[in-house]
Amino acid sequence: MALGQVSTGNDSGPVYGAELQGFDYPYPVSYYTFQSQRQELKMAYMDVAPDAKAANGRTVVLLHGKNYCSATWEGTIKVLAKAGYRVIAVDQIGFCKSSKPASYQFSFQQLAKNTNDLLHSLGIHEATVIGHSTGGMLGIRYALTYPQETRQLVLVDPIGLEDWKAKGVPPISVDQWYKRELGTTAERIRNYEKSTYFAGQWRADYDRWVQMLAGMYRGPGKNVVAWNSALLYDMILTQPVVYELPQLKVPTLLMIGDKDTTAIGKEYAPADKRPLLGDYPKLAHATVAAIPKATLVEFPDAGHAPQLQDPDAFHAALLPEMRTVH
């Protein structure tokens, strides 16, 4: 079946390549090619110029979540560019339109370096970093590693605000993750996102992002997509950042949907431990207390993705906070 065609069967929908070939992004895609861990890799990114009349000389870097891609930031890119910001939206290695290596030692440190090297290749040495979900966890590592180059850190329902293993999630092998990821379908993604990302609600426009991800699992590169996903889950679960939150030196804006319940590996935890994981209102207040220069914005009716669930409220809260950092 050709890429972009619609499959039939139990999981029908578009078919995409392992690097999301066939799925169109809202802005032109460029590639940063580099050597890492004895192989040549390429990172996909969108570099969107600011509105010429509003240009303020500032750059924003957008970091996507585990189940999303840089394209999912489409609405935020538009708002930020109109407000005068240059926007760099990146697909990390192992995700979306970027390389899916057969062998790679994934670490947040490595992904942060890849991102920093990309920015340097574009002549960017200072940026506001906005990270959602796993991208928030990466943003924390980025700001810890490159504090002088991080003007501001914005964390949108970041994961990593707790140590899941310490709270009862048992060890999960890469092989276990791989077997689980091979079973990925649009229905499974949709059900998960409905309950955690959107607080039990669903709109038709969310399905575009479900099919973006599910399409890679219908395609010829399904195995390498699942393998990279398994390696990434292992990275997330075994590399906690919560203990280093007090070391963040940059102004930090924490944006939280209070109905979020995300916790990596929750389904593997004992039944009596699961209700204690992913309590985002509690985690948010503990986090803002731990980070020296932090501000908290809460969205009472939103889940894990307030930027999609209520974009008007999200952007109305985001832009004024960004303008306060000089």
Image (cartoon, rainbow, N blue to C red):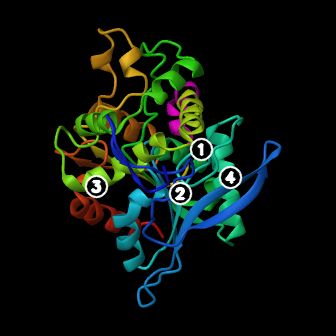
At label 2, counting other C-alpha atoms closer than 10 Å, the crowd grade (few under 14, some 14-19, many 20 or more) is some
Disc 1 to disc 3, C-alpha distance:
23 Å
Which residue occupies 49% across, 54% down?
A: 3
Q: Which residue is mark 4?
A: 114
Q: Which residue is mark 1?
A: 94
Q: Earlier in the sequence, mark 3 or mark 2?
A: 2
- Indicate the amino acid at tag 1: Gly
Residue 88 location, x and y as percent? 53, 66
Horizontal side of residue 84 vs 282, given as left or right: right
For the record, the magenta segment spans 236-247
Disc 3 to disc 4, C-alpha distance:
27 Å
Q: Nearer the viewer, mark 3 or mark 2?
A: 2
Residue 148 against residue 215 in the figure, above or below: below
Which residue occupies 43% across, 22% down?
A: 265
Which residue occupies 47% across, 72% down?
A: 27
Instruction: Name the residue nearer the viewer: 209 or 311.
Output: 209
Q: Is residue 242 magenta?
A: yes
Q: Is residue 140 visible?
A: yes
Q: Nearer the viewer, mark 1 or mark 3?
A: 1
Q: Which residue is mark 3?
A: 308
Q: Is residue 254 visible?
A: no
Disc 1 to disc 2, C-alpha distance:
14 Å
Instruction: Name the residue nearer the viewer: 4 or 139.
Output: 4
- Indicate the amino acid at tag 2: Gln
Hey, which residue is sitting farthest bottom in the picture?
A: 53
Q: Earlier in the sequence, mark 1 or mark 3?
A: 1
